Image: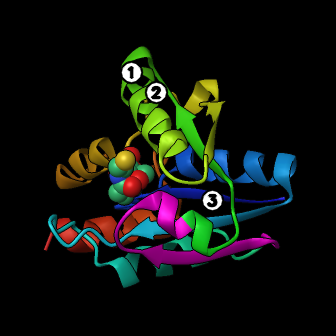
Amino acid sequence: MKVIYAGSFDPVTNGHIDIIKRAKKIFGEVIVAVLNNTNKKGLFTVEERKDLLRQVLADEDNIIIDSFEGLLVDYAISKGCKVIVRGLRSASDYINEYTLSMANMNYKDGVETVFLMASGDTLFISSTMAKEVAQFDGDLSMFVPDVVAKALKEKLLK
Ligand code: PNS
């Protein structure tokens, strides 16, 4: 089954990679979809985010890197997917994700959301935190792959 794992990925972290690989193990094929949010400028452009995703997932088959604008459910349906995968790290993630999943399920064609709990060693990781550590030239090895750490420091320590 083909599923969607969507997000901002600004940039991709070890937490995202963990969820992508586990989702692939369960479902077989994962479309990793970067939100092109025209209202919010990120640190990386959508093309740069996709490029980093491609590099860190280069050894994985059955993973497609794409981007989308607008509603996630519309994108999922356009790709023939009825399942969205999301990662959960904490109770506060759960509150936000529950509402989002209910909205997505009740909209049109009933797209389901399946949650995977973040692994213990990625529970604390977020793109925001990785950016903060990079800004102070900290050690990023726990947060992101080397290629992403390099890209972050090039952006933030110029
Ligand atoms: O990585 P993020 O920022 O947690 O990802 C959030 C994302 C992209 C999954 C979510 O914001 C989203 O689906 N945005 C697209 C617009 C949308 O469908 N919103 C829900 C309205 S019901």
Instruction: Check the image and report above or below for 36 versus 138.
Output: below
Q: Secondary structure at mark 2?
A: helix
Mark 1 closeness class: few <14, some 14–19, many ≥20 residues within 10 Å: few
Visual colour scheme: rainbow
State whether residue 148 appears in this view: yes
Marks 2/3: CA–CA distance:
17 Å
Q: Does mark 2's beta carbon lie closer than 8 Å to ligand 1? A: no
Marks 2/1: CA–CA distance:
5 Å
Amino acid residing under circle 1: Ile
Which residue was labeled with disc 2? 98
Amino acid residing under circle 3: Ile
Picture quadrant of residue 143: top left
Report the side of 152 relative to 87 (left or right): left
Q: Quadrant of the N terminus?
A: bottom right
Which residue was labeled with disc 3? 4
Q: Residue at x 86, y 59 (%)?
A: 28
Q: Residue at x 65, y 46 (%)?
A: 18
Q: Position of residue 10 (x, y in %)?
A: 34, 61
In the image as oriented, which residue stretches furthest toward the top?
91
Amino acid residing under circle 2: Tyr
Q: Are marks 3 and 1 in contact (CB under 8 Å)?
A: no
Q: Quadrant of the C terminus?
A: bottom left
- Give the magenta part as a residue range: 60-75
Q: Secondary structure at mark 1?
A: helix
Which residue was labeled with disc 1? 95
Query: Which is nearer the eye, 57 or 92?
Result: 92
Q: Does mark 3's beta carbon lie closer than 8 Å to ligand 1? A: no
